[in-house]
Image (cartoon, helix red, strand yellow):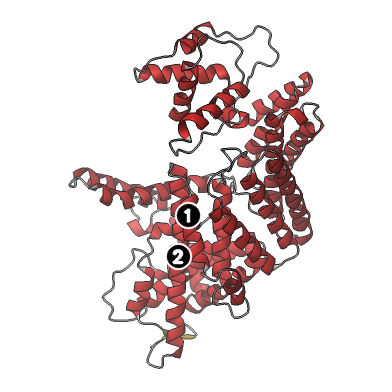
Amino acid sequence: MNDYFEAIAWCMDRISAPQRGVSMRELGEWITTYNEEVRTPKGETPLAHSRASLYRKFSSVDEALERTRSYLASREHPIPSALESYVITAKKTVGDPYTRVWNTDSSSEVLERALERAQRYGDDAEQVILAQHLAEKLLRNSGPSDKVLSRAYKVAESGYKVAANSPSRSRSKRLRHEQMLCARAAAWAAVRRSRVYIDNPDKTDRFLHLVETWKRREAELASTLALPVTATVSRFHADRASALIRDDREESISNLRDIAQFLLTTRKPGPGTDANDLVRYHDLTSIVQRLCAADWAFSTHPSHQGLIEQYFPDGIPDVVKRLRHLYGDDERGHDARTDAQALITLKEMNDALLKEYENASKNPSAAVVDVGDSTLRLPDAERLYAAISPVKAWTFFRVYEHSALHALAMARYAVAVHDIDVQQDTTLPELPIAADRLLTAARDFCRHAKKVTRPKAVDQTLLERVSLAETEIDKRLPAEHYEAVRQMRRDAATNVGPDFRTGERAFSVIAENTLTSLVLKALTSERLEQEQVKPLAIAAQTIHRYLRDRQSDASSEDIDP
């Protein structure tokens, strides 16, 4: 926010006399000027300046100016005379029917009432922006409720139609921009509804058709607003939805190749385009995830490996590594880059393990172990350990949003840990959890992935990989043992008394005891260097994000169908 306060102060310093009645649109124009004259020459990322973006940060112009004055005063910076005069004389117009009574943090109920009020006054612009905000609020808090998702879709659709029929639309760039955001929200709602009915192909396809329609509308509006990056990414999502409907693997791969090439060759907004036309983190992350899914599904596949070689001759990991550099240096950008690196790390583990097991199957001197009814030919324990050791435990938290990739990585890891344990006379470090617990969790994740992953195109092949990995788990974990571990896990959920040993207590108790020990050790240890602290900070942030998101009922914010 400090960047915005600096921008507003810079603009107010250029005003010779105080002004009244400054609108949020004019504030956006000020920041546009600041971007062009201050930030762009320095090579800094332009500040978002659309009316919608500013309303996400400030409930009104008065609030923006008052907070700017407070910011300058707190740092003992000079306060422009125009800003001082404006804040002192600022008063709300008595009886103004359009006085804003909501902001982006308002509840759904407040936004609903504000939307009804705007409808009564016939304020098209207010209706459109409220519809967009309300739809997003409903989507973020809906969980799997189709009733709420349906309401979100209708609200976004109504905002789009109000903008389309407004007499101000042709001359109002802001109104068309907010109409574009309504189309995006409607597509998001359709994606979420398609997932609710993932076991009903007809309903799923119907919602995917809606996704395609709305993303193409978003692309059309983006083109009229000189937003070529937004338009191209929106068309990618529309084309992907179309490929899913037709279950076309090759088109899915070619679409990924095209969007990746576009993003990697489009550096900065060109002349005549909006300075804020950059790929959104959600979109970039979804593209990275889809690329990784294609790599896991098709690389080394006997029937489909040729698709990867045809469309990605240098390999998908190279493309993903280059796409990582498109994230900014802010906290969210760093977080997203770490997620992408986690996918790469787990894929490298997957490939190394597959190679070890393939070599062992051809090696007559490989270790042979009987487990239950299965006879397993295993790679050397040290080679297995070398394949999994680069993976930190919290790396799995970084990829849980993509259920199939998360399940496949967990299955590979758990099987390797089991096969290390069953080999005798190893001096390798032990994990602080039994292999059968890992195998049980991996099997649960595999079954969950099959329920929530759409069995089409790339994901169909990925699910085949998940099924094969689950078969390897079954060889090592008989059904009765699996059920026994699950029962032990259920019992442990309520075992919190002092009579229970640490390993039998509920996870919340174990976690609190472990964190208490860790904090006390940190307080009493030698001061750590920055490089020593960095991996610990990443681990703590990763665990916090996982627990926070698991506590929420909301699904991923991603628009990827």
Amino acid type at mark 2: Leu
Residue under the point 56% across and 66% down? 446
Quadrant where the C terminus sits is bottom right
Query: Residues under labels 1 and 2: Cα distance?
Result: 16 Å
* Residue 442 in sight here: no
- Describe the element under mark 2 as helix, strand or loop: helix
- Describe the element under mark 1 as helix, strand or loop: helix
- Judged left or right of residue 176, residue 36 is left
Residue 43 image position (x, y, % from top left): 45, 39
Which residue carries the number 1 mark? 324
Residue under the point 38% across and 88% down? 366
- Judged left or right of residue 532, residue 548 is right
Q: Which mark is residue 94?
A: none
Please state the total of marks drawn on the protein image: 2
Q: Nearer the viewer, mark 1 or mark 2?
A: 1
Which residue lies most toward the front here?
Answer: 271
Which residue carries the number 2 mark? 346
The residue closer to the viewer here, 540 or 304, is: 304
Residue under the point 52% across and 21% down? 64
